[in-house]
Amino acid sequence: MAQTKQLFSENEIESFIDKNCIQNIGSHLNTSRDILKELFSNLNEWALENNSQLKKDKSFYSKEIIGLLETLRFVFCGDDYDVSDIINSSKHEFMKDIEKLQKEKKDKAINIHKFLWSHINYKDLLYSKKLITNDYPYLHIAELESATKIYLSKSWLKSSIVEWMLIDALVFSETIHFHQNQPNRVKNPYNNKIAIVFPIIFSLMSEFFYLVLTALVCFFLAADNQTIYWLIFSAITIIRWLNPNKFKREQDSQKTIELLFEMIGIYTQHLKEQAFNPILVRELLLDLSKKGAVYSHYIFHLLDRKISNSHQ
C-alpha cells in the first residue's frame, strides 16, 4: 500500500532546523536553515514516490541529513582549525564557544554556521594583493570531493543549494590552484598596471643585457676588425632572436594565461547565481579540460545529476 503520509511533518522539520541552526538574521537564500528545509522536503517527496524502498526508520534519514550538513560546515572551514573545532558543537555550545574567538574568527564561524559558502568575488582577488598574501578561502579539494561523494551516494539526498555550493566551491578551488601555480607577475594582472608595465620593462632590460654581452664577446673575438665584429654580432643576435624555443616558451606562456582567464571567466560569469545553466557550464568546463585545465570529475557528476533532475 502506497504511503500517503509525509515521512517528516512540518513540525518535525522545524524542530530539526531549530536544534541544528542558529537564528537567521535578515534574508539570505543559501542558509543552513534553507538547506535542511529543502533536504527534508525533497526526502518527503522521494518517500511518497518510493515507499517500497523505505527500509530504514526515520532516525536513519534524519541522521544522514544532519550528518551531511555537519560535513559541509567542516569542509567549508578549510584550514581554520579554531573554527572547525567548534563548528559542529550543539547550538548552545557553539554560541558559547564563539565568544572565546577573536572578532574575525567569530564572524567567520557564524557565517559558515549560517551560510556555509558564498560565491567568491574573484575580481576582488585580482585587483588586490589577496592572491599574494593568500587572503582567500582555502579549501581542500579532496575534502570537497569526499563531501560530494557522500551527497551523490544517496539518491534521496537532493538540494539545489548544496549542489550549487559544491560545484561553485570545487570550480573556485581548481581555478585558484591553477592560478597560484603561475609566475608572480601574472597573479595580479589588474593590480596598478604593474602586470602591463613589468613584462615590458623586464623584456627590454633582458634584451639590453644580451646585447651588451654579445658586444663584449664580439670585441674579444674580432679585436679591431670592424667587419668581423659586426658579422659575429649580427649572426649571434639573429640566431638568438630566431630561437624557436624562445617563441615556443612565449606561446606556451600566452596560452597558459589565456586558459587561466577563461577559467576565471567561467567561475565569475556562470556560477555567481544559484540558478545557473548546468548544461552550458558542463560544456564550457569540458572545453577547457581539452585545452589543459584540470577539474575534479565530481564537478561533472554533480552537473549530470543537476541536469537529470531538471528533466524530471
Image: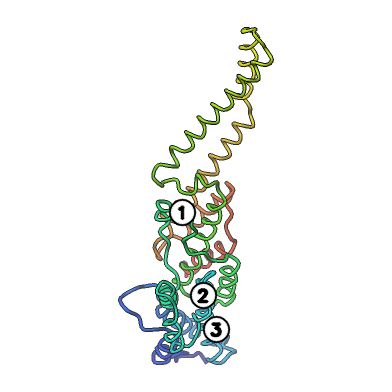
Q: Where 207 falls versus 128 (above or below)? A: above
Mark 2 = which residue?
72
Residue topped by disc 3 = 64
- Residue at mark 3 to residue at mark 1: CA–CA distance: 33 Å
| Front position among marks 2 and 3 | 2
Look at 39% across and 55% down and name the residue there: 124
Tag 1 residue: 266
Q: Do the residues labelled 2 and 1 touch (CB within 8 Å)?
A: no
Under mark 1, the amino acid is: Ile
In the rendered image, residue 97, in percent from the top left (x then y), is placed at 46, 84
Q: Residues within 10 Å of mark 1 (few under 14, many from 20)?
A: some
User: x, y percentage for residue 67?
Assistant: 54, 82
Between the C-alphas of marks 2 and 1, the distance is 24 Å
**Kind of residue sitting beneath label 3:** Glu
Q: How is the image coloured?
A: rainbow
Task: In the rendered structure, find residue 274 and report the number of the disc placed on it.
Answer: none
Q: Quadrant of residue 297?
A: bottom right
Q: Which amino acid does label 2 sit on?
A: Leu
Q: What's the distance in space between the residues labelled 2 and 3, CA to CA?
A: 12 Å
Image x and y of residue 158, in percent: 49, 76
Q: Mark 3, residues whose alpha carbon is within 10 Å: few (<14), some, or many (≥20)?
A: some
Which structural element holds mark 2?
helix
The mark that comes first in sequence, 3 or 1, is 3
